[in-house]
Image: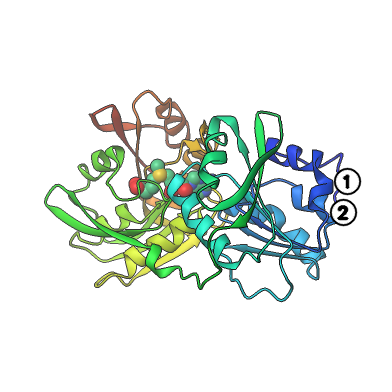
Amino acid sequence: MTSPLASHLTNQGQLIVRNQALFELGHLVMIGLPADDLATHLLSDGVGYITALTRDFSAYRRLLPLQARLEDRFSLSFAPILSMDFTRSVDGVLLFLQKSKPLMDFWLAMVLSFLPEGVPIWLVGENDEGIKSWKKRLKNSFDYVKSVDNARHCVLLEASGSLQKPENFVLEPWFETFSVSAGPVNMDITSLPGVFSHGRLDKGTQVLLATLDKVPSGKVLDFGCGAGVISAYINTLPGEYDITLVDCDALALASSTKTMSAKGRDSFTVLPSDGLSEVTGQFDLIISNPPFHQGVKTHYEVTEQFLAQSCQMLRPGGELRIVANSFLRYPPIIQKAFGHCETLLTRDGFSVYRAVNRY
Ligand SMILES: C[S@@+](CC[C@H](N)C(=O)[O-])C[C@H]1O[C@@H](n2cnc3c(N)ncnc32)[C@H](O)[C@@H]1O
């Protein structure tokens, strides 16, 4: 097992470890696990069995070796919801606060559907993600809500006495389909709560699509696909496309699968990936409105790496096309990887960049 000293804990993880005695349970369910070593800590210090759900592929990849080592004590899924056919009774649920309130409502409804009477749920999250407002919100669903601890800019809340009787929870009704228009093209996009730009077309994506009147037939990589808007648009263009959609978010992957499964869109692959970690092969077009937020903080690393590596995944003559906030310093990175970088359009604070693999 990883030594606790060598391991990494997020701020939430450190707060949980401070209160470890609370979690020394036979069976703990953890929802929304981040990419850290908290599960390793808890399993080495008193928790009998953990059932865990993460939406984040980088957390899933990090925890797979733990699952392989402790398969009789740790069950991990990378999915929008848990499969709730528990073989042992649940003694507690630990939920990690998510930035999106609709996603929290979705996961809380899932937890309430299986939470046995008298079993507590803990919610942990950072102050700047809005954890404080959840004390009041949880009172809509539970009789008793209290703050257990706060440190490391985080708060740990405990709630019990669910006001709702357990009932069947089904994923399907949580998908929402909405129509968006980009120029003359109308598309139906399906997405789950918490997926980027749920229910609307992002401004940046709109600017990117405005540059895409023609796309030559071939293999396309839609990096950070979200609900699949860009791929859905490409599929309306005249041409034959073999599209691979990647994202690190399990909810985005489930959503884009739905969007792409709609009538007339059949040649596509949906792939979980952290950056380009799982992507193989060569493409004629790599297209993206790449990520620059993670939680409430801004992270550029994933996109910087993606830009630096994408040239190697393009066939000779293949093209990278991305949109980004104009203030982001991406052109020098593209320039370094490709030897050039063209700005196709700047509008509403966004720029569309293009580079071709000339090697
Ligand atoms: C700006 S959104 C764009 C979504 C969609 N393409 C659109 O235009 O509406 C960026 C997407 O990148 C995904 N993402 C974030 N970090 C990632 C990573 N490390 N690897 C792959 N995808 C990532 C996010 O989940 C999100 O869906």
Name of the residue lying farthest toward the top? 327
The residue at 32%/72% (across/down) is 266
Q: Is residue 359 visible?
A: no
Write down the residue under mark 1: 3
The number of discs equals 2
Name of the residue lying farthest toward the front? 143
Give me the C-alpha separation between circle 1 and circle 2: 10 Å
Viewer-side label of 1, 2: 2
- Which is nearer the N-term, disc 1 or disc 2? 1
301 to 249, vertically: above or below: above
Q: How is the image coloured?
A: rainbow
Q: What amino acid is labelled 1 in the image?
A: Ser
Measured as percent of width and height from the top left, residue 296 is found at 51, 34
Name of the residue lying farthest toward the left? 184
Going by the image, does 345 lie left or right of 17? left
Residue labelled 1 has its Cβ within 8 Å of some atom of ligand 1: no
Res 243 quadrant in image: bottom left
The residue at 62%/64% (across/down) is 115
Name the secondary structure under disc 1: loop
Question: Which label is found at residue 44?
Answer: 2
